[in-house]
Amino acid sequence: MDKLKDITDTVRTNVQLMVDSPRDVIVECFPTDGGASIRIAVAPTDLGKIIGKQGRTARALRVLTSAMGMATKQKISLDITE
């Protein structure tokens, strides 16, 4: 479980660096069978920055999160909520 906290903290730090309102960033981790689900919520004005053009930024965040999960032998999904 400690590694999931580290991954969640890393995702939170990266997202906070991308947005204009870092205090409004909420990152939650929910354990699932064989892994976890990480949910990100940001201010409505920052949603476009997290998604990026054609979803490229969101895809990059998902790849990064997935790679960190693979290093710990866990399947981690990343969801962006409004």
Image: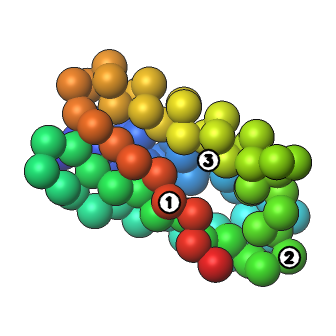
Q: Quadrant of residue 43?
A: bottom right
Where residue 53 is drawn, which disc sits there?
A: none
Quadrant occupied by the C terminus: bottom right
Which residue does the numbered mark 2 point to in the structure image?
A: 45
Q: Residue furthest top?
A: 71
- Three-letter amino acid code at the position of disc 3: Thr
User: Distance from label 2 to label 3 (Cα)?
Assistant: 18 Å
Q: Is mark 3 on a helix, strand or loop?
A: helix
| Classed neighbour count for the residue bearing mark 1: other residues with Cα under 10 Å, few (<14), some (14–19), many (≥20) | some
Residue at image point 57% right, 72% down: 81
Q: Is residue 48 in view? A: yes
Residue 56 screen position, x and y as percent: 76, 40
- Three-letter amino acid code at the position of disc 2: Thr
In-image side of 81 versus 48 (left or right): left
Name the residue nearer the viewer: 14 or 36. Answer: 36
**Which badge, 1 or 2, comes first in the chain's sequence?**
2
Residue at image point 22% right, 44% down: 35
Q: Is mark 1 on a helix, strand or loop?
A: strand
In-image side of 68 versus 64 (left or right): left
Which residue does the numbered mark 3 point to in the structure image?
A: 13
